[in-house]
Protein backbone atom coordinates (compact mmCIF):
# COMPACT_ATOMS: atom_id res chain seq x y z
CA UNK A 1 0.00 0.00 0.00
CA UNK A 2 2.85 2.39 0.87
CA UNK A 3 4.51 1.59 -2.48
CA UNK A 4 1.27 2.43 -4.31
CA UNK A 5 0.94 5.72 -2.46
CA UNK A 6 4.60 6.55 -3.11
CA UNK A 7 4.21 5.75 -6.81
CA UNK A 8 1.07 7.91 -6.98
CA UNK A 9 2.85 10.80 -5.31
CA UNK A 10 5.76 10.51 -7.74
CA UNK A 11 3.34 10.45 -10.67
CA UNK A 12 1.56 13.58 -9.48
CA UNK A 13 4.90 15.30 -8.93
CA UNK A 14 5.95 14.33 -12.43
CA UNK A 15 2.75 15.76 -13.90
CA UNK A 16 3.21 18.96 -11.93
CA UNK A 17 6.74 19.40 -13.18
CA UNK A 18 5.67 18.65 -16.74
CA UNK A 19 2.90 21.25 -16.58
CA UNK A 20 5.24 23.85 -15.09
CA UNK A 21 7.88 23.20 -17.76
CA UNK A 22 5.49 23.21 -20.69
CA UNK A 23 5.60 25.89 -23.34
CA UNK A 24 2.93 28.49 -22.72
CA UNK A 25 0.80 29.82 -25.60
CA UNK A 26 -1.33 32.95 -25.42
CA UNK A 27 -3.80 34.07 -28.07
CA UNK A 28 -4.71 37.66 -27.11
CA UNK A 29 -8.24 38.88 -27.79
CA UNK A 30 -7.23 42.03 -29.65
CA UNK A 31 -8.26 43.26 -33.09
CA UNK A 32 -6.44 42.01 -36.17
CA UNK A 33 -6.16 45.07 -38.42
CA UNK A 34 -6.51 44.83 -42.18
CA UNK A 35 -4.08 47.73 -42.58
CA UNK A 36 -1.30 46.22 -40.44
CA UNK A 37 1.63 44.19 -41.73
CA UNK A 38 2.06 42.41 -38.41
CA UNK A 39 -0.78 41.52 -36.06
CA UNK A 40 -0.10 39.42 -32.98
CA UNK A 41 -1.72 36.02 -33.49
CA UNK A 42 0.10 34.04 -30.78
CA UNK A 43 2.63 34.76 -28.05
CA UNK A 44 4.85 31.95 -26.77
CA UNK A 45 6.80 31.59 -23.55
CA UNK A 46 9.49 28.91 -23.24
CA UNK A 47 10.02 28.73 -19.46
CA UNK A 48 13.23 26.79 -18.82
CA UNK A 49 15.43 26.74 -21.87
CA UNK A 50 19.04 25.63 -21.69
CA UNK A 51 21.69 27.65 -23.53
CA UNK A 52 21.77 26.49 -27.12
CA UNK A 53 18.26 24.96 -27.18
CA UNK A 54 16.48 25.42 -30.51
CA UNK A 55 12.75 25.70 -31.20
CA UNK A 56 12.98 23.88 -34.49
CA UNK A 57 9.37 23.95 -35.65
CA UNK A 58 5.94 25.14 -34.68
CA UNK A 59 2.63 24.00 -36.17
CA UNK A 60 -0.48 26.17 -36.43
CA UNK A 61 -3.84 24.70 -37.37
CA UNK A 62 -6.83 26.74 -38.48
CA UNK A 63 -10.29 25.51 -37.59
CA UNK A 64 -12.92 24.81 -40.23
CA UNK A 65 -14.78 28.01 -41.02
CA UNK A 66 -11.70 30.20 -41.18
CA UNK A 67 -11.42 31.82 -44.61
CA UNK A 68 -7.83 30.92 -45.48
CA UNK A 69 -7.91 33.13 -48.59
CA UNK A 70 -8.21 36.16 -46.31
CA UNK A 71 -4.76 35.45 -44.79
CA UNK A 72 -1.72 36.67 -46.72
CA UNK A 73 1.14 35.72 -44.44
CA UNK A 74 2.26 34.25 -41.13
CA UNK A 75 5.62 35.16 -39.57
CA UNK A 76 7.54 33.65 -36.66
CA UNK A 77 9.65 36.01 -34.55
CA UNK A 78 12.13 35.41 -31.73
CA UNK A 79 12.02 38.16 -29.13
CA UNK A 80 14.70 37.28 -26.63
CA UNK A 81 14.80 36.43 -22.97
CA UNK A 82 13.45 37.67 -19.67
CA UNK A 83 15.05 39.89 -17.05
CA UNK A 84 16.21 37.92 -14.02
CA UNK A 85 14.33 39.99 -11.51
CA UNK A 86 11.09 40.22 -13.47
CA UNK A 87 8.48 38.04 -11.84
CA UNK A 88 5.12 36.73 -12.88
CA UNK A 89 3.59 35.17 -15.97
CA UNK A 90 4.31 37.28 -19.03
CA UNK A 91 4.03 36.61 -22.74
CA UNK A 92 6.28 39.39 -23.95
CA UNK A 93 9.20 41.34 -22.49
CA UNK A 94 8.08 44.51 -24.37
CA UNK A 95 5.43 45.66 -26.82
CA UNK A 96 6.27 44.11 -30.17
CA UNK A 97 4.09 46.66 -31.94
CA UNK A 98 2.97 49.83 -30.19
CA UNK A 99 -0.16 51.78 -31.01
CA UNK A 100 1.69 54.89 -29.82
CA UNK A 101 4.98 54.50 -31.72
CA UNK A 102 4.54 57.40 -34.13
CA UNK A 103 4.90 56.35 -37.79
CA UNK A 104 5.66 52.75 -36.81
CA UNK A 105 2.35 51.29 -35.68
CA UNK A 106 1.77 48.79 -38.47
CA UNK A 107 4.77 46.45 -38.34
CA UNK A 108 6.95 44.65 -35.82
CA UNK A 109 9.57 46.74 -34.08
CA UNK A 110 12.89 45.21 -35.26
CA UNK A 111 14.52 46.22 -31.98
CA UNK A 112 12.48 43.58 -30.19
CA UNK A 113 11.74 40.94 -32.83
CA UNK A 114 14.06 38.79 -34.95
CA UNK A 115 12.34 37.22 -37.96
CA UNK A 116 12.76 33.43 -38.14
CA UNK A 117 10.52 32.39 -41.03
CA UNK A 118 7.51 33.56 -42.96
CA UNK A 119 4.86 31.60 -44.83
CA UNK A 120 2.69 33.03 -47.59
CA UNK A 121 1.01 29.81 -48.64
CA UNK A 122 -1.65 29.39 -46.01
CA UNK A 123 -3.35 26.02 -45.67
CA UNK A 124 -5.33 24.47 -42.89
CA UNK A 125 -1.99 23.55 -41.27
CA UNK A 126 1.12 25.78 -41.38
CA UNK A 127 4.58 24.83 -40.07
CA UNK A 128 7.12 27.55 -39.21
CA UNK A 129 10.79 26.89 -38.46
CA UNK A 130 13.61 28.46 -36.48
CA UNK A 131 17.36 27.90 -36.10
CA UNK A 132 17.70 30.44 -33.31
CA UNK A 133 19.74 29.27 -30.32
CA UNK A 134 18.02 30.25 -27.11
CA UNK A 135 19.65 31.68 -24.02
CA UNK A 136 19.26 30.05 -20.63
CA UNK A 137 15.98 30.64 -18.79
CA UNK A 138 12.77 32.16 -20.16
CA UNK A 139 12.63 32.81 -23.91
CA UNK A 140 9.91 34.43 -26.01
CA UNK A 141 8.55 33.96 -29.52
CA UNK A 142 5.54 35.35 -31.29
CA UNK A 143 3.61 34.76 -34.49
CA UNK A 144 2.20 37.54 -36.60
CA UNK A 145 -0.54 37.41 -39.20
CA UNK A 146 -1.02 39.69 -42.18
CA UNK A 147 -4.48 39.83 -43.64
CA UNK A 148 -5.53 40.51 -47.20
CA UNK A 149 -6.47 44.19 -47.28
CA UNK A 150 -9.72 43.31 -49.07
CA UNK A 151 -10.81 40.72 -46.50
CA UNK A 152 -14.27 41.33 -45.07
CA UNK A 153 -14.50 43.15 -41.76
CA UNK A 154 -16.68 40.27 -40.61
CA UNK A 155 -13.83 37.77 -41.03
CA UNK A 156 -13.03 35.62 -38.02
CA UNK A 157 -9.87 33.65 -37.29
CA UNK A 158 -9.91 30.51 -35.17
CA UNK A 159 -6.50 28.87 -34.81
CA UNK A 160 -4.35 27.04 -32.30
CA UNK A 161 -0.74 25.94 -31.88
CA UNK A 162 -0.86 22.15 -32.05
CA UNK A 163 2.80 21.13 -32.00
CA UNK A 164 6.16 22.57 -30.96
CA UNK A 165 9.45 20.76 -31.50
CA UNK A 166 12.47 21.74 -29.40
CA UNK A 167 15.78 19.91 -29.90
CA UNK A 168 14.09 17.24 -31.99
CA UNK A 169 11.41 16.40 -29.41
CA UNK A 170 7.78 17.42 -29.11
CA UNK A 171 7.29 19.82 -26.21
CA UNK A 172 4.19 19.88 -23.97
CA UNK A 173 1.97 22.88 -24.71
CA UNK A 174 -0.08 24.77 -22.15
CA UNK A 175 -2.83 26.95 -23.58
CA UNK A 176 -6.21 28.28 -22.41
CA UNK A 177 -8.97 25.73 -22.65
CA UNK A 178 -11.49 28.23 -23.99
CA UNK A 179 -11.65 28.81 -27.71
CA UNK A 180 -10.44 32.26 -28.83
CA UNK A 181 -12.12 33.60 -31.95
CA UNK A 182 -10.26 36.58 -33.36
CA UNK A 183 -11.97 39.41 -35.21
CA UNK A 184 -10.56 41.78 -37.77
CA UNK A 185 -10.82 45.55 -37.81
CA UNK A 186 -9.46 48.62 -39.53
CA UNK A 187 -7.10 51.23 -38.12
CA UNK A 188 -8.92 54.39 -39.15
CA UNK A 189 -6.32 56.60 -37.42
CA UNK A 190 -2.83 55.67 -36.25
CA UNK A 191 -0.28 57.69 -34.30
CA UNK A 192 1.63 59.74 -36.87
CA UNK A 193 -1.03 59.71 -39.59
CA UNK A 194 -1.17 63.11 -41.30
CA UNK A 195 1.69 64.17 -38.98
CA UNK A 196 -0.45 64.12 -35.84
CA UNK A 197 0.97 62.53 -32.70
CA UNK A 198 -2.35 61.27 -31.40
CA UNK A 199 -6.06 60.82 -32.12
CA UNK A 200 -8.65 60.65 -29.35
CA UNK A 201 -12.37 60.89 -28.45
CA UNK A 202 -14.34 58.98 -31.12
CA UNK A 203 -17.85 59.77 -32.31
CA UNK A 204 -19.66 57.68 -34.94
CA UNK A 205 -22.96 57.89 -36.84
CA UNK A 206 -24.60 56.38 -39.89
CA UNK A 207 -26.03 58.95 -42.29
CA UNK A 208 -29.33 58.71 -44.11
CA UNK A 209 -27.44 57.56 -47.21
CA UNK A 210 -25.68 54.77 -45.29
CA UNK A 211 -22.26 56.45 -45.00
CA UNK A 212 -20.31 56.16 -41.76
CA UNK A 213 -19.02 59.42 -40.28
CA UNK A 214 -16.37 59.23 -37.58
CA UNK A 215 -15.24 62.31 -35.66
CA UNK A 216 -12.34 62.66 -33.24
CA UNK A 217 -9.69 64.92 -31.79
CA UNK A 218 -6.61 65.51 -33.95
CA UNK A 219 -4.09 66.00 -31.15
CA UNK A 220 -1.17 67.30 -33.13
CA UNK A 221 1.50 67.59 -30.45
CA UNK A 222 0.67 64.93 -27.87
CA UNK A 223 -2.21 62.95 -26.39
CA UNK A 224 -3.06 65.49 -23.66
CA UNK A 225 -6.46 67.17 -23.31
CA UNK A 226 -7.34 70.79 -24.00
CA UNK A 227 -5.74 73.28 -23.81
CA UNK A 228 -3.47 72.17 -26.67
CA UNK A 229 -3.21 72.24 -30.45
CA UNK A 230 -6.30 70.16 -31.22
CA UNK A 231 -8.67 70.20 -34.22
CA UNK A 232 -11.77 68.14 -35.01
CA UNK A 233 -11.12 65.49 -37.65
CA UNK A 234 -13.63 63.57 -39.77
CA UNK A 235 -13.27 60.17 -41.43
CA UNK A 236 -15.89 58.96 -43.88
CA UNK A 237 -16.66 55.49 -45.20
CA UNK A 238 -19.08 54.68 -48.00
CA UNK A 239 -18.68 50.90 -47.85
CA UNK A 240 -19.72 50.05 -44.27
CA UNK A 241 -16.28 50.69 -42.79
CA UNK A 242 -14.29 48.52 -45.19
CA UNK A 243 -12.31 51.54 -46.43
CA UNK A 244 -12.11 55.16 -45.28
CA UNK A 245 -11.58 58.37 -47.21
CA UNK A 246 -8.70 60.77 -46.40
CA UNK A 247 -9.21 62.75 -43.22
CA UNK A 248 -11.11 66.03 -43.34
CA UNK A 249 -11.09 68.80 -40.74
CA UNK A 250 -14.52 69.91 -39.50
CA UNK A 251 -13.38 72.54 -36.99
CA UNK A 252 -10.16 74.46 -36.39
CA UNK A 253 -9.38 77.73 -34.59
CA UNK A 254 -5.61 77.66 -35.04
CA UNK A 255 -5.33 81.20 -36.44
CA UNK A 256 -7.86 83.05 -34.27
CA UNK A 257 -6.70 86.23 -32.44
CA UNK A 258 -3.07 85.67 -33.30
CA UNK A 259 -2.64 83.25 -30.40
CA UNK A 260 -0.37 80.22 -30.79
CA UNK A 261 -2.31 77.26 -32.17
CA UNK A 262 -1.63 75.41 -28.92
CA UNK A 263 -3.83 77.98 -27.16
CA UNK A 264 -6.71 77.76 -29.60
CA UNK A 265 -7.73 74.14 -29.42
CA UNK A 266 -11.15 72.66 -30.10
CA UNK A 267 -11.99 69.13 -28.96
CA UNK A 268 -14.04 66.35 -27.38
CA UNK A 269 -16.51 66.05 -30.29
CA UNK A 270 -19.89 64.46 -30.68
CA UNK A 271 -21.80 63.96 -33.91
CA UNK A 272 -25.51 63.75 -34.74
CA UNK A 273 -27.59 63.01 -37.84
CA UNK A 274 -30.88 64.85 -38.21
CA UNK A 275 -32.82 61.91 -39.61
CA UNK A 276 -35.52 64.19 -41.05
CA UNK A 277 -33.31 66.63 -42.96
CA UNK A 278 -30.11 64.61 -43.46
CA UNK A 279 -28.00 67.36 -41.90
CA UNK A 280 -25.02 66.15 -39.88
CA UNK A 281 -24.10 68.20 -36.79
CA UNK A 282 -20.71 68.10 -35.10
CA UNK A 283 -20.34 69.69 -31.67
CA UNK A 284 -17.11 70.50 -29.83
CA UNK A 285 -15.72 72.95 -27.29
CA UNK A 286 -13.28 75.72 -28.24
CA UNK A 287 -10.79 77.00 -25.68
CA UNK A 288 -9.24 80.38 -26.46
CA UNK A 289 -6.16 81.32 -24.45
CA UNK A 290 -5.91 79.69 -21.00
CA UNK A 291 -2.18 79.18 -21.39
CA UNK A 292 -1.37 75.53 -21.79
CA UNK A 293 -2.96 74.18 -18.64
CA UNK A 294 -5.88 71.81 -18.73
CA UNK A 295 -9.15 73.52 -19.59
CA UNK A 296 -11.04 71.36 -17.08
CA UNK A 297 -9.31 73.11 -14.18
CA UNK A 298 -8.53 76.50 -15.76
CA UNK A 299 -11.95 77.39 -17.16
CA UNK A 300 -13.86 80.18 -15.40
CA UNK A 301 -17.37 81.65 -15.17
CA UNK A 302 -18.54 84.09 -17.81
CA UNK A 303 -19.70 84.02 -21.41
CA UNK A 304 -16.89 85.45 -23.56
CA UNK A 305 -14.04 83.43 -25.11
CA UNK A 306 -11.42 85.08 -22.91
CA UNK A 307 -13.43 84.03 -19.84
CA UNK A 308 -14.77 80.56 -20.55
CA UNK A 309 -14.69 77.85 -23.26
CA UNK A 310 -17.18 78.20 -26.12
CA UNK A 311 -19.65 75.57 -27.30
CA UNK A 312 -19.39 75.28 -31.09
CA UNK A 313 -21.39 73.52 -33.82
CA UNK A 314 -20.56 72.78 -37.44
CA UNK A 315 -22.98 71.36 -39.97
CA UNK A 316 -22.66 69.30 -43.13
CA UNK A 317 -25.43 69.17 -45.71
CA UNK A 318 -23.59 66.95 -48.19
CA UNK A 319 -23.13 63.71 -46.25
CA UNK A 320 -19.98 64.80 -44.44
CA UNK A 321 -17.96 65.95 -47.46
CA UNK A 322 -17.81 69.61 -46.42
CA UNK A 323 -18.50 71.47 -43.19
CA UNK A 324 -19.77 74.93 -42.32
CA UNK A 325 -17.90 77.58 -40.41
CA UNK A 326 -18.26 77.00 -36.64
CA UNK A 327 -21.46 78.29 -35.06
CA UNK A 328 -21.21 79.56 -31.47
CA UNK A 329 -24.21 78.52 -29.34
CA UNK A 330 -22.69 79.32 -25.94
CA UNK A 331 -25.02 82.22 -25.19
CA UNK A 332 -28.05 80.08 -26.06
CA UNK A 333 -27.40 77.44 -23.44
CA UNK A 334 -24.70 78.34 -20.90
CA UNK A 335 -25.42 79.71 -17.44
CA UNK A 336 -22.93 82.57 -16.86
CA UNK A 337 -22.10 81.20 -13.42
CA UNK A 338 -20.89 77.87 -14.81
CA UNK A 339 -17.16 77.50 -15.17
CA UNK A 340 -17.28 75.14 -18.16
CA UNK A 341 -19.94 73.81 -20.52
CA UNK A 342 -19.23 71.13 -23.10
CA UNK A 343 -20.85 68.22 -24.85
CA UNK A 344 -20.81 64.60 -23.82
CA UNK A 345 -18.45 63.21 -26.45
CA UNK A 346 -19.63 60.48 -28.80
CA UNK A 347 -22.96 60.98 -30.58
CA UNK A 348 -26.34 62.61 -30.29
CA UNK A 349 -29.75 61.40 -31.44
CA UNK A 350 -32.88 62.33 -33.33
CA UNK A 351 -35.94 61.53 -31.23
CA UNK A 352 -39.01 60.00 -32.84
CA UNK A 353 -40.74 63.39 -32.80
CA UNK A 354 -37.77 65.00 -34.59
CA UNK A 355 -36.13 66.63 -31.54
CA UNK A 356 -32.32 66.71 -31.74
CA UNK A 357 -30.51 65.83 -28.51
CA UNK A 358 -26.87 65.94 -27.40
CA UNK A 359 -25.59 64.89 -23.99
CA UNK A 360 -23.79 67.70 -22.14
CA UNK A 361 -21.65 68.20 -19.06
CA UNK A 362 -20.83 71.33 -17.10
CA UNK A 363 -18.84 72.50 -14.09
CA UNK A 364 -20.88 74.75 -11.81
CA UNK A 365 -19.71 77.80 -9.86
CA UNK A 366 -18.50 75.55 -7.03
CA UNK A 367 -16.53 73.45 -9.57
CA UNK A 368 -18.85 70.47 -9.21
CA UNK A 369 -19.43 68.63 -12.51
CA UNK A 370 -22.89 67.61 -13.72
CA UNK A 371 -24.25 65.72 -16.75
CA UNK A 372 -27.43 66.47 -18.66
CA UNK A 373 -28.80 67.10 -22.17
CA UNK A 374 -29.29 69.93 -24.63
CA UNK A 375 -31.96 69.81 -27.32
CA UNK A 376 -33.32 71.53 -30.40
CA UNK A 377 -36.92 71.55 -31.66
CA UNK A 378 -36.11 73.42 -34.88
CA UNK A 379 -33.49 71.24 -36.55
CA UNK A 380 -30.51 72.86 -34.88
CA UNK A 381 -31.38 76.54 -35.22
CA UNK A 382 -31.81 77.04 -31.46
CA UNK A 383 -30.78 74.95 -28.46
CA UNK A 384 -31.96 74.63 -24.86
CA UNK A 385 -30.89 73.13 -21.52
CA UNK A 386 -33.08 72.45 -18.48
CA UNK A 387 -31.73 70.72 -15.39
CA UNK A 388 -28.77 68.37 -14.86
CA UNK A 389 -29.41 64.69 -14.20
CA UNK A 390 -26.88 64.07 -11.43
CA UNK A 391 -23.95 65.76 -9.72
CA UNK A 392 -20.36 64.52 -9.88
CA UNK A 393 -20.96 63.00 -13.31
CA UNK A 394 -19.37 63.93 -16.61
CA UNK A 395 -19.21 62.24 -20.02
CA UNK A 396 -22.65 60.88 -20.88
CA UNK A 397 -24.61 59.40 -23.77
CA UNK A 398 -28.34 59.64 -24.42
CA UNK A 399 -30.82 57.20 -25.98
CA UNK A 400 -34.59 57.24 -26.50
CA UNK A 401 -35.76 54.05 -24.81
CA UNK A 402 -39.50 54.67 -25.29
CA UNK A 403 -41.29 57.33 -27.30
CA UNK A 404 -40.49 60.58 -25.49
CA UNK A 405 -38.44 58.87 -22.76
CA UNK A 406 -34.69 59.58 -22.71
CA UNK A 407 -32.09 57.56 -20.84
CA UNK A 408 -28.86 59.29 -19.85
CA UNK A 409 -25.94 56.93 -19.18
CA UNK A 410 -23.17 58.80 -17.33
CA UNK A 411 -19.55 58.52 -16.30
CA UNK A 412 -19.70 58.70 -12.51
CA UNK A 413 -16.69 60.10 -10.66
CA UNK A 414 -17.60 57.97 -7.66
CA UNK A 415 -16.28 55.02 -9.65
CA UNK A 416 -17.37 51.41 -9.88
CA UNK A 417 -20.49 51.65 -12.04
CA UNK A 418 -22.37 53.83 -14.50
CA UNK A 419 -24.97 56.33 -13.35
CA UNK A 420 -28.29 56.01 -15.22
CA UNK A 421 -31.24 58.44 -15.14
CA UNK A 422 -34.33 58.93 -17.30
CA UNK A 423 -36.47 61.93 -18.24
CA UNK A 424 -39.87 62.31 -19.90
CA UNK A 425 -39.71 66.09 -20.24
CA UNK A 426 -36.35 66.83 -21.91
CA UNK A 427 -34.49 67.22 -18.65
CA UNK A 428 -36.85 69.31 -16.55
CA UNK A 429 -37.13 66.36 -14.16
CA UNK A 430 -35.11 63.17 -13.81
CA UNK A 431 -35.80 59.71 -12.37
CA UNK A 432 -33.25 57.20 -11.18
CA UNK A 433 -33.28 54.08 -13.37
CA UNK A 434 -33.34 50.62 -11.77
CA UNK A 435 -29.88 49.91 -13.27
CA UNK A 436 -28.37 53.05 -11.74
CA UNK A 437 -24.94 52.38 -10.18
CA UNK A 438 -25.45 48.61 -10.31
CA UNK A 439 -25.72 47.03 -13.77
CA UNK A 440 -22.81 48.42 -15.76
CA UNK A 441 -19.38 48.51 -14.20
CA UNK A 442 -16.78 51.05 -15.29
CA UNK A 443 -13.29 52.31 -14.43
CA UNK A 444 -14.47 55.98 -14.68
CA UNK A 445 -14.35 56.38 -18.44
CA UNK A 446 -16.50 57.48 -21.36
CA UNK A 447 -18.93 54.87 -22.76
CA UNK A 448 -21.42 54.51 -25.61
CA UNK A 449 -25.15 53.77 -25.56
CA UNK A 450 -27.56 53.38 -28.50
CA UNK A 451 -31.18 52.28 -28.72
CA UNK A 452 -32.24 50.14 -31.69
CA UNK A 453 -36.02 49.68 -32.04
CA UNK A 454 -37.32 46.26 -33.05
CA UNK A 455 -38.39 47.47 -36.49
CA UNK A 456 -34.81 48.61 -37.25
CA UNK A 457 -32.87 45.44 -36.42
CA UNK A 458 -32.80 41.90 -37.74
CA UNK A 459 -33.54 40.39 -34.32
CA UNK A 460 -36.95 42.04 -34.24
CA UNK A 461 -36.53 43.05 -30.60
CA UNK A 462 -36.05 46.39 -28.90
CA UNK A 463 -32.33 46.58 -28.16
CA UNK A 464 -30.03 48.69 -26.07
CA UNK A 465 -26.36 48.37 -26.99
CA UNK A 466 -23.56 49.58 -24.73
CA UNK A 467 -19.76 49.63 -24.97
CA UNK A 468 -17.00 50.50 -22.52
CA UNK A 469 -13.96 49.02 -20.75
CA UNK A 470 -15.69 46.23 -18.82
CA UNK A 471 -13.59 46.61 -15.67
CA UNK A 472 -13.31 48.80 -12.60
CA UNK A 473 -9.51 49.04 -12.43
CA UNK A 474 -8.27 50.14 -15.84
CA UNK A 475 -9.13 50.91 -19.46
CA UNK A 476 -8.97 47.49 -21.01
CA UNK A 477 -11.47 44.77 -22.00
CA UNK A 478 -13.46 46.87 -24.48
CA UNK A 479 -16.79 45.05 -24.61
CA UNK A 480 -20.14 45.44 -26.36
CA UNK A 481 -23.16 44.53 -24.22
CA UNK A 482 -26.83 44.13 -25.13
CA UNK A 483 -30.05 44.48 -23.16
CA UNK A 484 -33.50 43.27 -24.22
CA UNK A 485 -35.38 44.71 -21.24
CA UNK A 486 -34.71 48.42 -21.51
CA UNK A 487 -31.39 48.36 -19.69
CA UNK A 488 -32.56 46.57 -16.55
CA UNK A 489 -30.22 43.65 -17.21
CA UNK A 490 -27.31 43.13 -19.61
CA UNK A 491 -26.95 39.36 -20.10
CA UNK A 492 -25.25 39.48 -23.50
CA UNK A 493 -21.71 40.65 -24.10
CA UNK A 494 -18.81 40.30 -26.54
CA UNK A 495 -15.19 41.10 -25.71
CA UNK A 496 -13.39 42.90 -28.54
CA UNK A 497 -10.08 44.04 -27.04
CA UNK A 498 -8.46 42.80 -23.86
CA UNK A 499 -5.46 45.10 -24.26
CA UNK A 500 -4.82 48.43 -22.57
CA UNK A 501 -5.91 51.59 -24.37
CA UNK A 502 -7.51 54.94 -23.70
CA UNK A 503 -10.91 53.26 -23.60
CA UNK A 504 -13.35 55.64 -25.34
CA UNK A 505 -15.83 54.17 -27.85
CA UNK A 506 -18.88 54.97 -29.95
CA UNK A 507 -21.49 52.66 -31.51
CA UNK A 508 -23.72 52.91 -34.55
CA UNK A 509 -25.91 50.51 -36.52
CA UNK A 510 -24.33 49.90 -39.94
CA UNK A 511 -27.40 48.04 -41.17
CA UNK A 512 -30.20 46.04 -39.58
CA UNK A 513 -27.88 43.11 -38.87
CA UNK A 514 -24.60 44.77 -37.95
CA UNK A 515 -23.31 47.18 -35.33
CA UNK A 516 -20.17 49.24 -35.88
CA UNK A 517 -17.82 50.55 -33.21
CA UNK A 518 -15.11 53.20 -33.43
CA UNK A 519 -12.88 53.08 -30.37
CA UNK A 520 -9.52 53.79 -28.80
CA UNK A 521 -8.06 50.30 -28.94
CA UNK A 522 -4.81 48.68 -27.88
CA UNK A 523 -3.68 48.44 -31.52
CA UNK A 524 -4.62 51.83 -33.06
CA UNK A 525 -5.76 55.21 -31.82
CA UNK A 526 -9.01 54.89 -33.81
CA UNK A 527 -10.03 51.30 -34.55
CA UNK A 528 -13.21 50.35 -36.38
CA UNK A 529 -14.88 46.95 -36.13
CA UNK A 530 -18.16 45.54 -37.43
CA UNK A 531 -20.06 42.89 -35.47
CA UNK A 532 -23.20 40.94 -36.31
CA UNK A 533 -25.95 41.33 -33.73
CA UNK A 534 -26.32 37.55 -33.63
CA UNK A 535 -22.72 37.31 -32.38
CA UNK A 536 -23.67 39.43 -29.36
CA UNK A 537 -27.21 38.24 -28.64
CA UNK A 538 -26.70 34.49 -28.79
Image (cartoon, grey):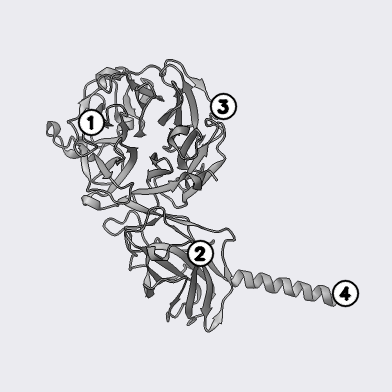
Where, by quadrant of the figure, is residue 506 drawn? top left
Distance between the alpha carbons at the discs numbered 3 and 1? 37 Å
Where, by quadrant of the figure, is residue 115 drawn? bottom left
Task: Mark 1 or mark 4: name the one nearer the start of the chain.
Answer: 4
Above/below status of 191 relative to 142:
above
Foreground disc of the pair 3, 4: 3
The residue closer to the viewer here, 499 or 62, is 62
Foreground disc of the pair 1, 4: 1
Look at mark 3 in the image and give the residue it sits on: 434
What secondary structure is marked by label 2?
Answer: loop
Look at mark 4 in the image and give the residue it sits on: 1
Above/below status of 170 relative to 359:
below
Q: Residue at x 23, y 30 (%)?
A: 315
Look at mark 2 in the image and give the residue it sits on: 64
Foreground disc of the pair 2, 4: 2
The residue closer to the viewer here, 535 or 137, is 535
Where, by quadrant of the figure, is residue 265 drawn? top left
Task: Mark 2 or mark 3: name the one nearer the start of the chain.
Answer: 2
Task: Mark 3 or mark 4: name the one nearer the start of the chain.
Answer: 4
Task: Mark 3 or mark 1: name the one nearer the start of the chain.
Answer: 1
Task: Mark 2 or mark 1: name the one nearer the start of the chain.
Answer: 2
Look at mark 1 in the image and give the residue it sits on: 315
For this view, does 475 lie left or right of residue 104? right
Q: Residue at x 33, y 38 (%)?
A: 206
Q: Which residue, as the protein is rendered here, is positioned at the far right?
A: 1
Amino acid sequence: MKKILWFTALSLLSLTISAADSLRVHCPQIPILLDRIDNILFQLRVPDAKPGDVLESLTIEFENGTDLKSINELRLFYSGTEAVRRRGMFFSPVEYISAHDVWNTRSANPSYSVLQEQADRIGRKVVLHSKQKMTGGINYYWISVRMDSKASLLTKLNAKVTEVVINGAKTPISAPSNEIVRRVGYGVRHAGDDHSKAYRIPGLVTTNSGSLIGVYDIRWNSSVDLQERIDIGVSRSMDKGQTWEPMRIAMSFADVDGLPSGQNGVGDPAVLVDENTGTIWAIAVWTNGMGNGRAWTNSMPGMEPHETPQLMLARSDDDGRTWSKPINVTKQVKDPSWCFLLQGPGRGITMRDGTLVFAIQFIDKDRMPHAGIMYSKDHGETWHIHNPARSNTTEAQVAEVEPGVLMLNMRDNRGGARAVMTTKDLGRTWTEHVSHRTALREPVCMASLIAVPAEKNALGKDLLLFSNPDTTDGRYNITIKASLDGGVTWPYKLLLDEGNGWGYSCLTMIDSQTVGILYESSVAHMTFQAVKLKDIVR
